[in-house]
Image (tube, rainbow, N blue to C red):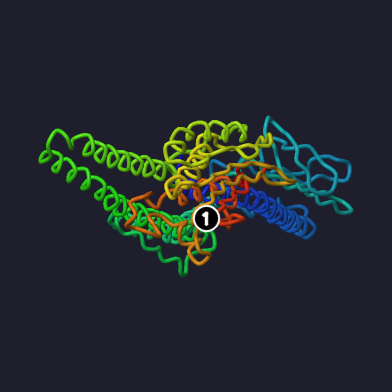
Amino acid sequence: MNSIRARLLLWLISSVLITTLVVGFLTARLTWSGFNNVRDLGLEQIAQTVMRHDEAAPELPPPVITSQTLADEDLDQFVSQIWDRSGRLVYSSLADVGPPLQPPGHHIVTWQGQSWRLYALPSELRTVQIAITTKIRRRHFYSLTPWLMVPLSLLVVTLGLLTNAGVNRALRPLEDLRHDLSQRSPEDLKSVNAVGLPDEIAPLADTLNQLLERVDQLITNQKRFLADAAHELNTPLAAIKLQAQLARRLGPAEWPSALDELDAGIERATRLSSQLLQLARLEPGARQPLLGPVQLDDILREAVSAFSARAEHLGCDLGLAGASAVSLHGDPHALRTLVDNLIDNALNHATAPVRIDVSLRADTHWAVLEVSDTGLGIAPADRQRVMERFVRLAPGDGKGSGLGLSIVREIAELHGALVELDDTPGGGLTVRVRLPLTGIPQPAAP
């Protein structure tokens, strides 16, 4: 049973029924006790009446008096007796003797297989004894039971209806919230109205609003990313198309130069598409980080080796200035992408001869990764801006896509790292990434 409404009704109505049964049982017990007391008082009154009659006219038989309304066929269920001082039965309203003489007071006795409720009233000369079968007493009590059950039944029905109405009213805000969300279009991500919601539901609405806000921001970012990506891809593709059209008009002697230009354009488009894929993989929810132990100095050596040929072709001096053995917990693929983009960014904006030094060291809490070049550097006023996507300080130079440092920043954020841009002593730019040696911060347990 997954319905909150059904569960609440089951528990509440069950509680009402159990409570009613307990109350009904206790009421019946108390009523039975009170009923017996009243009937016992009736036996006492009959005994006193018979005693007065016997004292006034002992030679006459006492009248047949009962406080109960008995049918003719039930007259044998009642008996009045008079006993003398010696214990001899002087009078009995039954043809049979009736129950034996008992001490003064109320008693329950068994006679001829039946249980009798009996009262004995003594005097100086006589003892009057009045008795009635408990069967008759129970029958009279049971005749009153419907008058007890009707109010209890009405109480149960009333409480059941009130409980159902109360549960429906309490769950109405949830139903209104469900109806509001079901009527929305997929594009409608505005916050739900949490005003006036019960304390138990308001946190749910607040959490839902936070989720809707994050989803809306994610969709907005994705739309902007797709628009920017389409615009950025259009430029190299248009250049490739133009170069191919020009190549058709050139003679065989100019084809090698045209093919070199075409190859360079394809390389730029390939690099841009690769970086776009890297960014897409870093989008929230795209994939879970593949966490594990990472030997960061090994990653640096592999990256420097992979870019050595390109650096040599560009006339740049790329080298590993120092790499302490550093091990941390992180995503090895993402960290390799971070290092590759740092070196690639330095090579893209290098003007030969440029020296590019890659280094790694560890202090108490951080692994410090630095990529320093002796190029033109970046003015302090522009350093925050170049961390954004598709930002190029010299858009017309055709170098880079404006994505390298933004990829570095997002991977750093994934690892709880800090990215700093600084001047290289003697001129140039130093990109410094401080990675916590404890690895990627884990979310707190709920």
Give the percent coordinates (x, y) of residue 55. 80, 58
Q: Residue type at mark 1? A: Trp
The answer to whether residue 35 is visible is: yes
The answer to whether residue 71 is visible is: no
Say which residue appears at 55% left-offset and 36% top-offset: 331
Residue lying farthest to the left in this orientation = 249
Element on which disc 1 rests = helix
Give the percent coordinates (x, y) of residue 5. 45, 50
**Is 171 on the left-hand or right-hand side of 302?**
left
Residue lying farthest to the bottom in this orientation = 195
Say which residue appears at 78% left-offset and 43% top-offset: 107
The total number of labels drawn is 1
Q: Which residue is mark 1?
A: 147
Looking at the picture, tell me which residue is in the foreground, 246 or 298.
246
Give the percent coordinates (x, y) of residue 330. 59, 38
Give the percent coordinates (x, y) of residue 233. 28, 47
Q: Is residue 75 above or below residue 198?
A: above
